[in-house]
Image: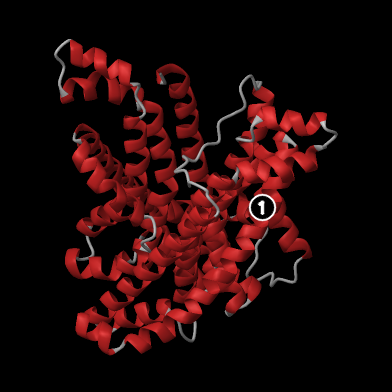
Amino acid sequence: MAEDLTGNLLFYLTNAAPTLVTALEGFAIAAAISLVFGAVGSLTGLLERSVSRVALAIYCLPLPALLPLISSLLGPGQPTRITMAVLFSFFPMLIGVIAGLRATPADIAAIVHCAGGGRLQILRKVGLRSALPNIVAGTRIAGPGAFLGALVAEFSGADNGLGVVLVVSQQKLQTAQTWGVAIVATVIGGLLYGTITAIGRWLHVDPVDSQTSFATVPGAGRLVRAAEFLTPPVALIVIWVVIVQFGDVSPLVFKSPLDVLDYLVSGPAAAAHRSALATDWLITMRDSGMIFGVGMAAAFIAGCILVSFPALLRLGLPLLLVSQCVPQIAFIPLLVAICGRGFAFIIVTGLLVVFFPAMIVIVTALEERSRSTIDVVSVYGGGRWATLRFVRIPGSVPGMLNAARISIPLALFGAVVAEWLVTGNGISQAMTTAATTFDYTRLWADVVVVSVTVIVLYEVVAALHERARRRFSV
């Protein structure tokens, strides 16, 4: 492996260059969009929440499975790859901008207002500066995300790039070359992560590891909550209809919502279509559930061990942070060689995709207990187990639900990629088959059903998180 990497270093760097260029272009576009939408959204609270929910809906979409549709809309070349890089990096960056602008100091904003400054001046002179820690935190996750998006996009057909090398090496069973791609991709992701962190430090900004949150505004009535819940599907349907009606797209590829409704509900073969889709959907939900369950359980156990032994936490935390720059998809061919194509592969994929992000959130939640409360347990003779059982775990319930909420789309992503590249079943394989047989109505129906499923699951866990936050947080 080391021989192959050093002996063919120029080959790897030559193929890494176009992938990195695509990632940087997508990252720059996502940064511009995030700043514009975040700044505009901060001026009106309702618009801010709507933008957040639409970004969430995009985040929950099965992006790898959308490659045929994006390629049909934009062409199979560079625009498609840049779009995937934007979609993979847009969400964490936007959340960083919005969370940072929400943290604008009210007293300093009031001073600017009293001096005659309007909302724009407050945003420019106070909001953006105070938001820098959150913006840096979002961008250092978005950087490796953009690279992952560019890598995934190259799977659908490109002349060069690390994604092309990864697919070819998997097909030819060239394990050494697969390891080489995984290592190079990890190094590039780490460099992106480290560069953004270094820029933040140069700007005297200490990045924060914020948790993704879409809590309803306190005191919001049922009408407002219903409007927030309906914003993502309505926005996506409007975008969908606009593209179909006014975009220069092929009617063979781009089906309307009515076409999908007829396919699943009112058409003569609707029952057969629903049955076939349900079979594939159940397989994907089974795989997603296994990935989610294994990843969350492992993250919870590991988090409890780390916070109970501070020395381990100090050693393990840097590893957790660095793990965010690893493009997990590059290791999937290696997992196949180790685990095969059965349930063992799905379980290890869960550990790879869900474990580290969930563990960071869970460790943060377990650590956020007041020192005085822990001291009370210690005074009465309680050890690590008692502190964990009576203080840390009950108080971290909201954080654990937040980790679950973040992990739901990640688990679906892992299942879709695993089915697409390895297992050859489930709804991802059905999408691939539908694209190759020009059955685009089935492809759109699959996308709609999967997207609705993950958004509903996310919102259910989000509602549980909000209730737990009010009840358990101390």
**Can residue 233 be seen in this snapshot?**
no
319 or 246, which is in the foreground? 319
Q: Residue at x 27, y 81 (%)?
A: 177
Quarter-of-image position of residue 14 = bottom left
316 or 296, which is in the foreground? 316
On the rendered image, what quadrant is the C terminus found in?
top left
442 or 53, which is in the foreground? 53
Residue 202 sits above or below residue 357 on the image = below
- Colour treatment of the image: secondary structure
Q: Amino acid at mark 1?
A: Leu
Quarter-of-image position of residue 172 = bottom left
- Label count reads 1
Quarter-of-image position of residue 293 = top left
**Can residue 207 be seen in this snapshot?**
yes
290 or 19, which is in the foreground? 19
On the rendered image, what quadrant is the N terminus found in?
bottom left
Q: Secondary structure at mark 1?
A: helix
Please state if 119 lies on the left or on the right of 257 as rendered. right
Mark 1 closeness class: few <14, some 14–19, many ≥20 residues within 10 Å: some
Query: In x, y percent, where is residue 422?
Result: 31, 67
Residue placed furthest toward the top: 380
Residue 22 sits above or below residue 340 on the image = below
Query: In x, y percent, where is residue 5?
Result: 27, 82
Find disc 1 in the rendering and name its residue: 35
Query: In x, y percent, where is residue 26?
Result: 58, 67
Please state if 85 lies on the left or on the right of 474 as rendered. right
Query: In x, y percent, where is residue 228?
Result: 64, 34
Q: Residue at x 21, y 80 (%)?
A: 2
